[in-house]
């Protein structure tokens, strides 16, 4: 007997669970080239019912939504939920050495509990330091800073390239030297 006769027979028996279970039962029975007789149909129908009962459906788990916000943003005591914009800092002195001296002596004063080197203590010492840095030349300022432990940052210089007036064979790669 064929598959079509099995489907017709199952419909007459009142099987109402769908054709896909009948199809899987039929495929299981005909595995390996076996011949299915009409006497095997009731067993196949029971097998199709078992497939229907044991069929596992997808049960989605409902996960509650949680709003995740970074700690920095939630700790801001304002009505806005964005971090405040930091104001741009402008240098006080136009000369970079004087600006560096002001930063150095400010940090030095913080370390020494308000003693700003040779300029005194507290706000008067800071004011004296600012006036002295503004009046004196960068060489004198650097000399006093070095006495109090300042180490200038040394930036290594690159050798001049072709555009800077250096030697042409150093600037070019080995393959293009035969110009």
Image: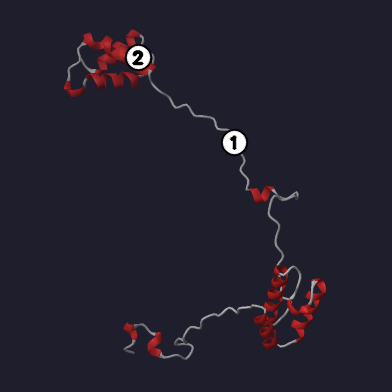
How packed is label 1: few (under 14 Cα within 10 Å), some, or many (20 or more)? few
In the visual, does 31 lie left or right of 86?
A: left
Q: Where is residue 109 in the image (x, y as percent from the top left)?
A: 73, 71
Instruction: Identify which residue, 33 or 164, lies in the foreground.
Output: 164
Instruction: Identify which residue, 131 or 66, lies in the foreground.
Output: 131
- Dot 1 corresponds to which residue? 65
In the visual, does 133 lie left or right of 7?
A: right
Q: Which of marks 1 and 2 is in front?
A: 1
Q: Position of residue 5 (x, y in %)?
A: 25, 14
Instruction: Identify which residue, 38 or 151, lies in the foreground.
Output: 151
| Residue 96 in sight here | no
From this view, report whether residue 67 is shown above or below residue 157: above
Q: Where is residue 161 in the image (x, y as percent from the top left)?
A: 45, 86
From this view, report whether residue 28 is shown above or below residue 126: above
Q: Which of the 4 image quadrants contains residue 26?
A: top left
Q: Which label belongs to residue 49?
A: 2
Instruction: Identify which residue, 71 or 46, lies in the foreground.
Output: 71
Q: Where is residue 6 in the image (x, y as percent from the top left)?
A: 26, 14
From this view, report whether residue 65 is shown above or below residue 89: above
How packed is label 2: few (under 14 Cα within 10 Å), some, or many (20 or more)? some
State how far apart marks 1 and 2 are (Cα).
39 Å
Q: Looking at the rendering, in which quadrant would you find the C terminus? A: bottom left
Query: Do residues under tags 1 and 2 come within 8 Å of each other at their CB atoms?
Result: no
Q: Which residue is drawn at 30% across and 22% down?
A: 24
Colour scheme shown: secondary structure
Q: Which residue is drawn at 61% across and 43% down?
A: 68
Q: Which residue is drawn at 72% across and 51% down?
A: 76
């Amino acid at each position: 007997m064929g598959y079509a006769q099995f489907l017709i027979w199952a419909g007459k028996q009142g099987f109402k669970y769908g054709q896909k279970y009948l199809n899987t039962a039929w495929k299981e029975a005909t595995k390996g080239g076996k011949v299915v007789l009409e006497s095997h149909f009731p067993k196949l129908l029971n097998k199709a019912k078992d497939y229907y009962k044991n069929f596992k459906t997808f049960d989605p788990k409902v996960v509650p939504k949680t709003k995740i916000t970074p700690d920095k943003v939630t700790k801001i005591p304002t009505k806005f939920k964005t971090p405040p914009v930091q104001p741009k800092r402008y240098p006080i002195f136009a000369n970079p050495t004087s600006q560096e001296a002001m930063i150095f002596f400010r940090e030095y004063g913080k370390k020494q509990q308000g003693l700003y080197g040779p300029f005194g203590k507290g706000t008067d010492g800071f004011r004296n330091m600012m006036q002295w840095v503004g009046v004196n030349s960068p060489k004198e300022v650097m000399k006093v800073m070095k006495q109090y432990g300042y180490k200038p940052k040394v930036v290594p210089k690159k050798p001049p390239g072709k555009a800077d007036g250096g030697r042409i064979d150093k600037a070019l790669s080995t393959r293009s030297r035969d110009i």
